[in-house]
Image: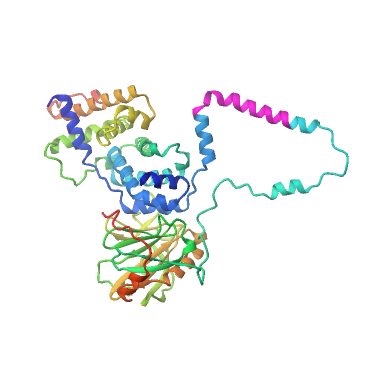
Amino acid sequence: MNRRSDIDQLMREWVDLGEDRLPLHHLHGALAEIETTRQRGAVSALLEDFLMRYQPIAAPLAIAAVLSVAIGVAAVVIQPAPAGPDPSPTSGATSDAIPTQTEAPSPTVATAPPSPTPAAERTLQAGGAAVPFSLTVPSEWERDERSLPTVFQVDTKIDTLDVFGRWLFFFAPETDETVEARLNRFVSNPQLLVTEPEPISLGGASGFVVDVRLNPEDPPEPRACSRFDSCLLITAGAGGWLILPDRPNRIWIVDVAGDTVLIGTSAIEGAFESWTTTVEAVLATIEWQAIGSAGNLETMTVGRSIPSTIDE
Amino acid sequence: MEQHLIERAKRGDRNAFSELAPGLGDRLYAVAHRILRDREVAGDVAQQTLIKVWRELPGLRSTDHFDGWSYRLVVNACYDELRRRRRAGPDLSLLETDDVTPDVQLTVADRDQLDRGFERLSPDHRAVIVLTFYLDYTAPEISRVLGVPVGTVRSRLHYAKQAMRAALEADRRPALDAREWA
Protein backbone atom coordinates (compact mmCIF):
# COMPACT_ATOMS: atom_id res chain seq x y z
CA MET A 1 0.00 0.00 0.00
CA ASN A 2 1.51 3.32 -0.98
CA ARG A 3 1.62 6.36 1.23
CA ARG A 4 -1.38 8.04 -0.39
CA SER A 5 -3.77 5.09 -0.17
CA ASP A 6 -2.46 4.29 3.30
CA ILE A 7 -3.58 7.65 4.72
CA ASP A 8 -6.87 7.39 2.82
CA GLN A 9 -7.57 3.98 4.31
CA LEU A 10 -6.69 5.14 7.82
CA MET A 11 -8.91 8.17 7.43
CA ARG A 12 -11.83 6.01 6.32
CA GLU A 13 -11.43 3.74 9.32
CA TRP A 14 -11.06 6.70 11.63
CA VAL A 15 -14.21 8.53 10.45
CA ASP A 16 -16.17 5.28 10.70
CA LEU A 17 -15.62 5.36 14.47
CA GLY A 18 -18.12 8.16 14.99
CA GLU A 19 -21.69 7.66 16.14
CA ASP A 20 -24.62 7.23 13.77
CA ARG A 21 -27.76 7.48 15.91
CA LEU A 22 -29.30 10.76 16.96
CA PRO A 23 -30.24 10.38 20.67
CA LEU A 24 -33.99 10.17 21.03
CA HIS A 25 -34.37 13.20 23.25
CA HIS A 26 -32.92 15.32 20.44
CA LEU A 27 -35.27 13.73 17.91
CA HIS A 28 -38.28 14.27 20.14
CA GLY A 29 -37.14 17.82 20.91
CA ALA A 30 -36.96 18.60 17.18
CA LEU A 31 -40.36 17.06 16.47
CA ALA A 32 -41.94 18.93 19.37
CA GLU A 33 -40.60 22.23 18.05
CA ILE A 34 -41.58 21.44 14.47
CA GLU A 35 -45.13 20.99 15.70
CA THR A 36 -45.26 24.72 16.38
CA THR A 37 -42.88 25.93 13.67
CA ARG A 38 -44.22 27.34 10.45
CA GLN A 39 -42.46 26.61 7.23
CA ARG A 40 -41.04 29.56 5.41
CA GLY A 41 -43.51 30.64 2.76
CA ALA A 42 -42.79 29.14 -0.62
CA VAL A 43 -43.28 32.53 -2.29
CA SER A 44 -40.66 34.26 -0.16
CA ALA A 45 -38.32 31.29 -0.61
CA LEU A 46 -38.70 31.41 -4.38
CA LEU A 47 -38.29 35.19 -4.43
CA GLU A 48 -35.12 34.93 -2.38
CA ASP A 49 -33.84 32.19 -4.65
CA PHE A 50 -34.65 34.31 -7.72
CA LEU A 51 -32.83 37.30 -6.28
CA MET A 52 -29.80 35.18 -5.48
CA ARG A 53 -29.69 33.65 -8.94
CA TYR A 54 -30.41 36.82 -10.87
CA GLN A 55 -28.74 39.37 -8.65
CA PRO A 56 -27.15 41.25 -11.59
CA ILE A 57 -30.52 42.00 -13.19
CA ALA A 58 -32.49 42.35 -9.96
CA ALA A 59 -31.79 46.08 -9.58
CA PRO A 60 -32.89 47.06 -13.13
CA LEU A 61 -35.97 44.88 -12.75
CA ALA A 62 -36.85 46.52 -9.44
CA ILE A 63 -36.43 49.99 -10.96
CA ALA A 64 -38.61 48.99 -13.90
CA ALA A 65 -41.28 47.66 -11.53
CA VAL A 66 -41.25 50.87 -9.45
CA LEU A 67 -41.49 52.98 -12.61
CA SER A 68 -44.41 50.91 -13.89
CA VAL A 69 -46.30 51.35 -10.64
CA ALA A 70 -45.54 55.07 -10.60
CA ILE A 71 -46.80 55.50 -14.17
CA GLY A 72 -49.94 53.54 -13.36
CA VAL A 73 -50.64 55.63 -10.26
CA ALA A 74 -50.00 58.85 -12.15
CA ALA A 75 -52.41 57.79 -14.91
CA VAL A 76 -55.16 57.19 -12.35
CA VAL A 77 -54.51 60.41 -10.44
CA ILE A 78 -54.54 62.73 -13.46
CA GLN A 79 -57.65 61.09 -14.97
CA PRO A 80 -60.65 63.49 -14.69
CA ALA A 81 -63.26 62.33 -12.17
CA PRO A 82 -66.46 61.00 -13.80
CA ALA A 83 -69.68 62.88 -13.32
CA GLY A 84 -72.28 61.43 -10.97
CA PRO A 85 -72.60 60.47 -7.33
CA ASP A 86 -69.60 60.12 -5.04
CA PRO A 87 -67.88 56.81 -5.29
CA SER A 88 -69.18 54.30 -2.81
CA PRO A 89 -66.93 53.81 0.19
CA THR A 90 -67.72 50.10 0.17
CA SER A 91 -64.98 49.28 -2.30
CA GLY A 92 -62.26 50.33 0.14
CA ALA A 93 -64.00 48.68 3.04
CA THR A 94 -64.32 45.46 1.14
CA SER A 95 -60.67 45.26 0.32
CA ASP A 96 -59.81 45.93 3.95
CA ALA A 97 -62.12 43.19 5.05
CA ILE A 98 -60.35 40.56 3.00
CA PRO A 99 -57.70 38.93 5.17
CA THR A 100 -54.28 38.89 3.61
CA GLN A 101 -52.99 35.58 4.74
CA THR A 102 -49.68 34.58 3.31
CA GLU A 103 -48.89 31.61 5.49
CA ALA A 104 -50.76 28.58 6.63
CA PRO A 105 -52.76 28.93 9.83
CA SER A 106 -50.92 28.23 13.03
CA PRO A 107 -50.69 24.52 13.66
CA THR A 108 -50.46 24.98 17.38
CA VAL A 109 -54.17 24.84 18.01
CA ALA A 110 -55.80 21.44 18.15
CA THR A 111 -57.22 20.43 14.81
CA ALA A 112 -60.79 19.90 15.97
CA PRO A 113 -62.81 19.82 19.13
CA PRO A 114 -63.75 16.33 20.26
CA SER A 115 -66.85 15.12 18.56
CA PRO A 116 -69.18 13.28 20.90
CA THR A 117 -70.67 11.23 18.09
CA PRO A 118 -68.14 10.99 15.31
CA ALA A 119 -69.64 10.23 11.93
CA ALA A 120 -67.04 7.59 11.17
CA GLU A 121 -64.46 5.94 13.31
CA ARG A 122 -61.12 4.40 12.77
CA THR A 123 -59.34 2.07 15.08
CA LEU A 124 -55.58 2.26 15.49
CA GLN A 125 -53.72 -0.66 16.89
CA ALA A 126 -50.32 -0.34 18.44
CA GLY A 127 -49.41 -3.88 17.49
CA GLY A 128 -45.78 -3.63 18.53
CA ALA A 129 -46.52 -1.95 21.83
CA ALA A 130 -45.12 -3.29 25.05
CA VAL A 131 -48.70 -3.30 26.31
CA PRO A 132 -50.85 -3.71 23.18
CA PHE A 133 -53.94 -1.58 22.83
CA SER A 134 -56.32 -0.13 20.30
CA LEU A 135 -57.71 3.38 19.95
CA THR A 136 -60.59 4.77 17.97
CA VAL A 137 -60.40 8.23 16.46
CA PRO A 138 -62.96 10.14 14.42
CA SER A 139 -61.97 9.71 10.83
CA GLU A 140 -62.29 13.42 10.09
CA TRP A 141 -59.23 13.96 12.24
CA GLU A 142 -57.22 11.90 9.86
CA ARG A 143 -55.34 14.26 7.59
CA ASP A 144 -53.55 11.79 5.43
CA GLU A 145 -54.42 8.15 5.21
CA ARG A 146 -50.99 7.23 3.87
CA SER A 147 -49.15 8.34 6.97
CA LEU A 148 -51.63 7.64 9.74
CA PRO A 149 -51.70 5.80 11.95
CA THR A 150 -47.99 5.58 12.43
CA VAL A 151 -46.54 3.62 15.29
CA PHE A 152 -42.83 3.72 15.96
CA GLN A 153 -41.74 1.05 18.34
CA VAL A 154 -38.72 2.68 19.86
CA ASP A 155 -37.77 -0.19 22.12
CA THR A 156 -39.51 -2.59 24.42
CA LYS A 157 -40.29 0.18 26.85
CA ILE A 158 -41.69 3.06 24.80
CA ASP A 159 -44.19 3.42 22.03
CA THR A 160 -44.79 6.70 20.34
CA LEU A 161 -48.11 7.01 18.67
CA ASP A 162 -48.54 9.79 16.18
CA VAL A 163 -52.19 10.75 16.21
CA PHE A 164 -53.18 13.47 13.77
CA GLY A 165 -49.68 14.84 13.67
CA ARG A 166 -49.24 15.16 17.41
CA TRP A 167 -47.59 12.87 19.82
CA LEU A 168 -48.85 10.54 22.43
CA PHE A 169 -46.24 8.63 24.37
CA PHE A 170 -46.94 5.24 25.84
CA PHE A 171 -44.45 4.00 28.39
CA ALA A 172 -44.46 0.64 30.06
CA PRO A 173 -41.32 0.86 32.20
CA GLU A 174 -39.59 -2.44 32.81
CA THR A 175 -39.81 -2.11 36.55
CA ASP A 176 -42.16 -3.42 39.18
CA GLU A 177 -43.02 0.11 40.24
CA THR A 178 -46.68 0.54 41.16
CA VAL A 179 -48.89 3.33 39.86
CA GLU A 180 -48.69 5.06 43.24
CA ALA A 181 -44.90 4.81 43.39
CA ARG A 182 -44.51 6.22 39.90
CA LEU A 183 -46.95 9.01 40.68
CA ASN A 184 -45.08 9.82 43.86
CA ARG A 185 -41.88 10.24 41.87
CA PHE A 186 -43.49 13.09 39.94
CA VAL A 187 -45.22 14.65 42.92
CA SER A 188 -42.08 14.63 45.06
CA ASN A 189 -39.80 16.00 42.33
CA PRO A 190 -39.04 19.65 43.24
CA GLN A 191 -38.20 20.40 39.62
CA LEU A 192 -41.80 19.76 38.62
CA LEU A 193 -45.13 21.40 39.34
CA VAL A 194 -47.73 18.63 39.53
CA THR A 195 -51.48 19.08 39.89
CA GLU A 196 -53.55 17.14 42.41
CA PRO A 197 -53.75 13.52 41.15
CA GLU A 198 -57.21 12.72 39.88
CA PRO A 199 -58.40 9.09 39.87
CA ILE A 200 -59.37 7.84 36.41
CA SER A 201 -60.17 4.67 34.51
CA LEU A 202 -59.00 4.13 30.94
CA GLY A 203 -60.42 1.10 29.20
CA GLY A 204 -60.86 -0.64 32.54
CA ALA A 205 -57.36 0.22 33.75
CA SER A 206 -57.47 2.37 36.86
CA GLY A 207 -54.96 5.01 37.85
CA PHE A 208 -54.44 8.76 38.03
CA VAL A 209 -54.06 11.75 35.75
CA VAL A 210 -51.90 14.77 36.51
CA ASP A 211 -50.67 17.84 34.68
CA VAL A 212 -46.93 18.41 34.93
CA ARG A 213 -44.96 21.56 34.26
CA LEU A 214 -41.37 22.59 34.87
CA ASN A 215 -41.09 24.41 38.16
CA PRO A 216 -39.69 27.86 37.35
CA GLU A 217 -38.67 28.31 41.00
CA ASP A 218 -36.53 25.18 40.99
CA PRO A 219 -34.98 24.75 37.59
CA PRO A 220 -33.44 21.39 36.90
CA GLU A 221 -29.70 21.22 37.50
CA PRO A 222 -27.90 20.04 35.60
CA ARG A 223 -30.06 20.56 32.56
CA ALA A 224 -30.61 17.11 31.20
CA CYS A 225 -30.84 18.36 27.67
CA SER A 226 -27.71 20.47 27.38
CA ARG A 227 -28.19 24.08 26.40
CA PHE A 228 -31.93 23.84 26.01
CA ASP A 229 -34.00 24.92 28.94
CA SER A 230 -35.63 21.56 29.39
CA CYS A 231 -35.59 18.48 31.51
CA LEU A 232 -35.66 14.79 30.78
CA LEU A 233 -38.78 13.72 32.61
CA ILE A 234 -38.37 9.99 32.15
CA THR A 235 -35.34 8.17 30.85
CA ALA A 236 -35.89 5.07 28.79
CA GLY A 237 -33.32 3.42 26.60
CA ALA A 238 -31.23 6.02 24.81
CA GLY A 239 -33.98 8.61 24.97
CA GLY A 240 -36.86 9.66 27.09
CA TRP A 241 -39.62 12.08 27.65
CA LEU A 242 -38.67 15.69 27.37
CA ILE A 243 -40.46 18.42 29.30
CA LEU A 244 -40.05 21.96 28.06
CA PRO A 245 -40.81 25.14 30.02
CA ASP A 246 -43.58 26.42 27.78
CA ARG A 247 -45.19 23.04 27.19
CA PRO A 248 -47.26 21.54 30.00
CA ASN A 249 -47.71 17.78 29.95
CA ARG A 250 -50.73 15.69 30.86
CA ILE A 251 -49.81 12.26 32.16
CA TRP A 252 -52.09 9.33 32.74
CA ILE A 253 -50.63 6.55 34.90
CA VAL A 254 -52.67 3.36 34.90
CA ASP A 255 -52.37 -0.23 35.94
CA VAL A 256 -52.94 -2.53 32.97
CA ALA A 257 -53.27 -6.05 34.36
CA GLY A 258 -50.29 -5.53 36.66
CA ASP A 259 -48.16 -3.39 34.29
CA THR A 260 -47.79 0.28 35.13
CA VAL A 261 -48.32 2.22 31.92
CA LEU A 262 -47.73 5.93 31.42
CA ILE A 263 -49.45 7.86 28.68
CA GLY A 264 -48.41 11.40 28.07
CA THR A 265 -48.97 14.27 25.75
CA SER A 266 -48.07 17.93 25.65
CA ALA A 267 -48.90 21.11 23.82
CA ILE A 268 -47.91 24.73 24.07
CA GLU A 269 -49.70 26.72 26.78
CA GLY A 270 -52.31 28.31 24.54
CA ALA A 271 -53.39 25.03 22.98
CA PHE A 272 -53.02 22.74 25.96
CA GLU A 273 -56.63 22.65 27.22
CA SER A 274 -58.08 22.20 23.77
CA TRP A 275 -55.58 19.52 22.83
CA THR A 276 -55.89 17.52 26.04
CA THR A 277 -59.68 17.55 25.71
CA THR A 278 -59.21 16.05 22.27
CA VAL A 279 -56.82 13.43 23.60
CA GLU A 280 -59.17 12.52 26.43
CA ALA A 281 -61.93 11.82 23.93
CA VAL A 282 -59.58 9.50 22.08
CA LEU A 283 -58.30 7.80 25.21
CA ALA A 284 -61.88 7.10 26.25
CA THR A 285 -61.94 4.56 23.39
CA ILE A 286 -58.82 2.70 24.44
CA GLU A 287 -58.97 -1.07 24.69
CA TRP A 288 -56.11 -2.95 26.31
CA GLN A 289 -55.42 -6.37 24.93
CA ALA A 290 -54.47 -7.54 28.43
CA ILE A 291 -57.88 -6.48 29.74
CA GLY A 292 -60.28 -6.82 26.79
CA SER A 293 -60.80 -9.87 24.61
CA ALA A 294 -57.99 -10.50 22.13
CA GLY A 295 -60.43 -11.53 19.41
CA ASN A 296 -62.13 -8.19 19.56
CA LEU A 297 -58.95 -6.41 18.49
CA GLU A 298 -58.63 -8.45 15.34
CA THR A 299 -62.08 -7.58 14.13
CA MET A 300 -61.83 -3.90 15.03
CA THR A 301 -58.41 -3.12 13.63
CA VAL A 302 -58.40 -1.36 10.31
CA GLY A 303 -55.25 0.69 10.82
CA ARG A 304 -51.74 -0.37 10.06
CA SER A 305 -48.69 -0.24 12.23
CA ILE A 306 -45.10 0.32 11.22
CA PRO A 307 -43.00 -1.39 13.82
CA SER A 308 -39.44 -0.96 14.83
CA THR A 309 -38.18 1.81 12.60
CA ILE A 310 -35.97 3.58 15.08
CA ASP A 311 -35.11 0.94 17.62
CA GLU A 312 -31.86 1.67 19.37
CA MET B 1 -40.54 6.27 -0.83
CA GLU B 2 -38.34 8.94 0.69
CA GLN B 3 -38.80 11.23 -2.31
CA HIS B 4 -42.54 10.95 -1.83
CA LEU B 5 -42.23 11.88 1.85
CA ILE B 6 -39.96 14.82 1.01
CA GLU B 7 -42.49 16.11 -1.53
CA ARG B 8 -45.27 15.91 1.02
CA ALA B 9 -43.18 17.49 3.76
CA LYS B 10 -42.28 20.27 1.34
CA ARG B 11 -45.98 20.99 1.00
CA GLY B 12 -46.28 21.31 4.77
CA ASP B 13 -47.22 17.75 5.78
CA ARG B 14 -45.91 17.31 9.32
CA ASN B 15 -46.75 13.64 9.37
CA ALA B 16 -44.55 13.03 6.35
CA PHE B 17 -41.73 14.96 7.99
CA SER B 18 -42.09 12.99 11.21
CA GLU B 19 -41.60 9.83 9.17
CA LEU B 20 -38.50 11.29 7.54
CA ALA B 21 -37.07 12.69 10.74
CA PRO B 22 -35.57 9.57 12.41
CA GLY B 23 -33.46 8.57 9.40
CA LEU B 24 -32.62 12.13 8.44
CA GLY B 25 -31.75 12.98 12.05
CA ASP B 26 -29.35 10.04 12.19
CA ARG B 27 -27.61 11.13 8.97
CA LEU B 28 -27.29 14.74 10.13
CA TYR B 29 -26.07 13.62 13.54
CA ALA B 30 -23.47 11.29 12.03
CA VAL B 31 -21.96 14.15 10.02
CA ALA B 32 -22.17 16.63 12.90
CA HIS B 33 -20.59 14.17 15.32
CA ARG B 34 -17.67 13.59 13.00
CA ILE B 35 -17.05 17.27 12.41
CA LEU B 36 -17.58 18.40 16.00
CA ARG B 37 -16.29 15.31 17.88
CA ASP B 38 -18.74 15.91 20.70
CA ARG B 39 -21.91 13.88 21.27
CA GLU B 40 -24.06 16.43 23.03
CA VAL B 41 -23.16 19.38 20.85
CA ALA B 42 -23.59 17.25 17.73
CA GLY B 43 -27.02 16.23 19.03
CA ASP B 44 -27.97 19.88 19.53
CA VAL B 45 -26.73 20.79 16.08
CA ALA B 46 -28.59 17.89 14.43
CA GLN B 47 -31.75 18.80 16.34
CA GLN B 48 -31.59 22.42 15.23
CA THR B 49 -30.78 21.39 11.68
CA LEU B 50 -33.82 19.10 11.58
CA ILE B 51 -35.97 22.09 12.52
CA LYS B 52 -34.25 24.23 9.89
CA VAL B 53 -34.78 21.55 7.23
CA TRP B 54 -38.49 21.59 8.04
CA ARG B 55 -38.69 25.40 7.97
CA GLU B 56 -36.70 25.89 4.79
CA LEU B 57 -37.98 22.89 2.84
CA PRO B 58 -40.47 24.84 0.67
CA GLY B 59 -37.49 26.73 -0.78
CA LEU B 60 -35.78 23.56 -2.02
CA ARG B 61 -36.08 23.60 -5.79
CA SER B 62 -35.79 19.88 -6.43
CA THR B 63 -36.17 17.01 -4.01
CA ASP B 64 -33.35 15.27 -5.92
CA HIS B 65 -31.00 17.68 -4.16
CA PHE B 66 -32.42 16.99 -0.71
CA ASP B 67 -29.43 15.05 0.64
CA GLY B 68 -26.81 17.56 -0.46
CA TRP B 69 -28.96 20.46 0.68
CA SER B 70 -29.57 18.99 4.14
CA TYR B 71 -25.85 18.21 4.51
CA ARG B 72 -25.09 21.80 3.59
CA LEU B 73 -27.37 22.98 6.40
CA VAL B 74 -25.73 20.72 8.97
CA VAL B 75 -22.20 21.60 7.85
CA ASN B 76 -23.05 25.31 8.11
CA ALA B 77 -24.47 24.71 11.59
CA CYS B 78 -21.22 22.96 12.52
CA TYR B 79 -19.22 25.93 11.20
CA ASP B 80 -21.28 28.25 13.39
CA GLU B 81 -20.76 26.01 16.41
CA LEU B 82 -17.00 25.78 15.87
CA ARG B 83 -16.69 29.54 15.40
CA ARG B 84 -18.70 30.12 18.55
CA ARG B 85 -16.42 27.76 20.46
CA ARG B 86 -13.27 29.37 19.17
CA ARG B 87 -14.54 32.74 20.31
CA ALA B 88 -15.30 31.21 23.70
CA GLY B 89 -11.82 29.72 24.05
CA PRO B 90 -10.58 26.16 24.38
CA ASP B 91 -13.18 23.50 25.11
CA LEU B 92 -12.08 20.34 26.85
CA SER B 93 -15.06 18.42 25.51
CA LEU B 94 -13.29 18.40 22.17
CA LEU B 95 -11.12 15.70 23.64
CA GLU B 96 -14.07 13.42 24.26
CA THR B 97 -13.54 9.91 22.98
CA ASP B 98 -16.01 7.27 21.95
CA ASP B 99 -16.45 3.84 23.45
CA VAL B 100 -16.01 2.17 20.11
CA THR B 101 -13.35 -0.47 19.67
CA PRO B 102 -11.07 0.66 16.87
CA ASP B 103 -10.49 -1.47 13.82
CA VAL B 104 -7.35 -3.56 14.03
CA GLN B 105 -5.86 -1.56 11.17
CA LEU B 106 -6.20 1.63 13.17
CA THR B 107 -4.14 1.48 16.31
CA VAL B 108 -5.04 3.38 19.44
CA ALA B 109 -2.00 5.55 18.88
CA ASP B 110 -3.07 6.31 15.30
CA ARG B 111 -6.49 7.21 16.48
CA ASP B 112 -5.21 9.50 19.16
CA GLN B 113 -2.92 11.23 16.70
CA LEU B 114 -5.72 11.60 14.17
CA ASP B 115 -8.02 13.01 16.85
CA ARG B 116 -5.44 15.61 17.74
CA GLY B 117 -4.69 16.41 14.13
CA PHE B 118 -8.39 16.84 13.38
CA GLU B 119 -8.81 19.18 16.35
CA ARG B 120 -6.31 21.54 14.78
CA LEU B 121 -8.09 21.65 11.43
CA SER B 122 -10.22 24.61 10.45
CA PRO B 123 -13.98 24.02 10.07
CA ASP B 124 -13.58 24.07 6.27
CA HIS B 125 -10.98 21.32 6.35
CA ARG B 126 -12.95 19.23 8.82
CA ALA B 127 -16.00 19.34 6.58
CA VAL B 128 -14.03 18.25 3.52
CA ILE B 129 -12.50 15.33 5.42
CA VAL B 130 -15.89 14.11 6.66
CA LEU B 131 -17.67 14.54 3.33
CA THR B 132 -14.84 12.76 1.52
CA PHE B 133 -14.11 9.85 3.82
CA TYR B 134 -17.41 9.32 5.57
CA LEU B 135 -19.95 10.12 2.85
CA ASP B 136 -17.63 9.13 0.00
CA TYR B 137 -18.57 12.32 -1.84
CA THR B 138 -16.51 13.33 -4.84
CA ALA B 139 -14.93 16.77 -5.16
CA PRO B 140 -17.72 18.05 -7.48
CA GLU B 141 -20.36 16.74 -5.04
CA ILE B 142 -18.62 18.44 -2.13
CA SER B 143 -18.35 21.58 -4.19
CA ARG B 144 -22.13 21.64 -4.54
CA VAL B 145 -22.70 20.96 -0.84
CA LEU B 146 -20.28 23.63 0.37
CA GLY B 147 -20.90 26.12 -2.42
CA VAL B 148 -17.22 26.51 -3.27
CA PRO B 149 -15.30 25.76 -6.50
CA VAL B 150 -14.07 22.21 -7.12
CA GLY B 151 -10.47 23.44 -7.06
CA THR B 152 -11.00 24.85 -3.59
CA VAL B 153 -12.36 21.51 -2.42
CA ARG B 154 -9.31 19.71 -3.82
CA SER B 155 -6.88 22.12 -2.22
CA ARG B 156 -8.67 21.91 1.13
CA LEU B 157 -8.61 18.13 0.96
CA HIS B 158 -4.93 18.15 0.08
CA TYR B 159 -4.11 20.43 2.98
CA ALA B 160 -6.31 18.53 5.42
CA LYS B 161 -4.77 15.18 4.51
CA GLN B 162 -1.32 16.65 4.78
CA ALA B 163 -2.14 17.90 8.27
CA MET B 164 -3.59 14.53 9.29
CA ARG B 165 -0.56 12.72 7.90
CA ALA B 166 1.67 15.10 9.84
CA ALA B 167 -0.34 14.32 12.97
CA LEU B 168 0.19 10.59 12.42
CA GLU B 169 3.90 11.07 12.01
CA ALA B 170 4.18 13.36 15.00
CA ASP B 171 5.23 10.61 17.40
CA ARG B 172 8.01 9.71 15.05
CA ARG B 173 9.08 13.34 14.87
CA PRO B 174 8.56 14.65 18.38
CA ALA B 175 10.56 17.78 17.68
CA LEU B 176 8.29 18.88 14.87
CA ASP B 177 7.39 22.48 15.23
CA ALA B 178 3.67 22.84 15.92
CA ARG B 179 3.57 25.84 13.61
CA GLU B 180 4.10 23.50 10.71
CA TRP B 181 0.58 22.08 11.13
CA ALA B 182 -1.26 25.15 12.32
Where residue A212 appears, as percent x and y from the top left, is 42, 65
Callout count: 0
Display colour scheme? rainbow
State the residue lying farthest toward the front.
A299
Q: Quarter of the image containing the C terminus of chain B? A: top left
Q: Give the residue displayed 42% in from the left and 70% down from the top.
A: A283
Residue A270 in the figure: left or right of residue B139 = right
User: Is residue A278 on the magenta stretch?
Assistant: no
Where residue B5 appears, as percent x and y from the top left, is 40, 47
A300, above or below B21, in the image: below
Q: Is residue A225 visible?
A: no
Q: Tell me where the magenta segment starts and ends, as one range.
A: A53-72
Q: Quadrant of residue A126?
A: bottom left
Where residue B74 appears, as percent x and y from the top left, is 36, 39
Nearest the eye: A83 or B167: A83
User: Is residue A71 on the magenta stretch?
Assistant: yes
State the residue lying farthest toward the right.
A84
Where residue B126 appears, as percent x and y from the top left, is 29, 32
Q: Is residue B153 visible?
A: yes
A70, above or below B14, in the image: above
Please, what is the dominant secondary structure of the magenta stretch? helix
Nearest the eye: A216 or A298: A298
Nearest the eye: A19 or A160: A160
Q: Quadrant of residue B111?
A: top left
Residue A84 in the figure: left or right of residue A271 = right
Nearest the eye: B171 or A247: A247
Residue B160 in the figure: left or right of residue A95 = left
